[in-house]
């Protein structure tokens, strides 16, 4: 069986099972007991899976009732709940290893590039906002001209 998957429901099931096996049910005795730690852990794994931020995960959970059913959520957590849970959980080395193991198992290892090439434009391969690109392009000739005139003067 191939361990790589593109199904968010399958990722949620496996992340919840991993969280239930490696985490306590609640953070401490006096916690509000609205969300369990395995549920929050699975939401953090989904954040990595969807390559989004905390608000994006809450949007996915709000719009996807099957995903909420798999995680056993009666209501959608606020994005600050996920952020605070991420800060609290990721401080512990055991949870970091559990998260890394779960994501690697579901998404596979990253491939290493044997040969790569770079260009001198300063742009990245990933998504860059139009505003940022426009600012870099407008400043780039000025910096080059200034550097070239300084070198000629010396």
Image: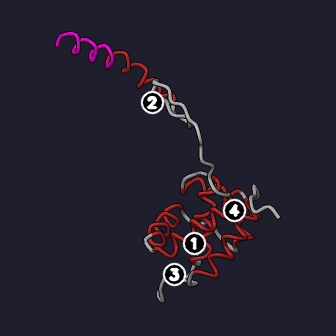
Dot 4, how many residues are within 10 Å of its Cα: few (below 14), some (14-19), or many (20+)?
Answer: many
Determine which residue is flagged by label 1: 98
Tell us which disc is closer to us: 4 or 3. Answer: 4
Q: Does label 4 or label 2 sit earlier along the sequence?
A: 4
- Distance (Cα) linking label 4 and label 2: 33 Å
**Rendered image: mark on residue 32:** 3
Residue 131 rendering spot, x and y as whole percentages: 47, 28
- Distance (Cα) linking label 4 and label 1: 12 Å
- Distance (Cα) linking label 2 and label 3: 42 Å
Does the residue at mark 4 contact the one at mark 2 (Cβ under 8 Å)?
Answer: no
- Which residue is at a point 60% across and 47% down the rendered structure image? 112
Residue 60 rendering spot, x and y as whole percentages: 66, 56
Q: Does label 1 or label 3 sit earlier along the sequence?
A: 3
Q: Secondary structure at mark 2?
A: helix
Q: Is residue 49 above or below residue 91?
A: above
- Distance (Cα) linking label 1 and label 2: 36 Å
Q: Is residue 111 above or below residue 117?
A: below
Res 135 quadrant in image = top left
Determine which residue is flagged by label 4: 106
Q: Residues in magenta? A: 143-154
- Which residue is at a point 50% across and 26% down the rendered structure image? 119
- Which residue is at a point 16% across and 13% down the rendered structure image? 154
Determine which residue is flagged by label 2: 132
Q: Does label 2 or label 3 sit earlier along the sequence?
A: 3
């Amino acid at each position: 069986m191939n361990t790589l998957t593109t199904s968010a429901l399958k990722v949620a099931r496996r992340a919840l099972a991993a969280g239930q096996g490696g985490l306590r049910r609640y953070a401490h005795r006096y916690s509000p007991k609205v969300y369990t730690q395995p549920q929050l852990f699975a939401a953090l794994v989904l954040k990595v899976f969807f390559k989004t931020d905390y608000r994006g995960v809450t949007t996915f959970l709000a719009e996807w009732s099957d995903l909420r059913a798999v995680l056993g959520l009666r209501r959608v957590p606020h994005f600050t709940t996920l952020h605070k849970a991420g800060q609290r959980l990721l401080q512990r080395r055991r949870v970091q290893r559990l998260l890394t193991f779960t994501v690697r198992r579901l998404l596979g290892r990253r491939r290493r590039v044997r040969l790569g090439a770079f260009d001198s434009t300063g742009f990245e391969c990933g998504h860059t906002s139009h505003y940022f690109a426009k600012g870099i392009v407008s400043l780039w000739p000025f910096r080059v001209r200034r550097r070239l005139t300084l070198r000629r003067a010396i």
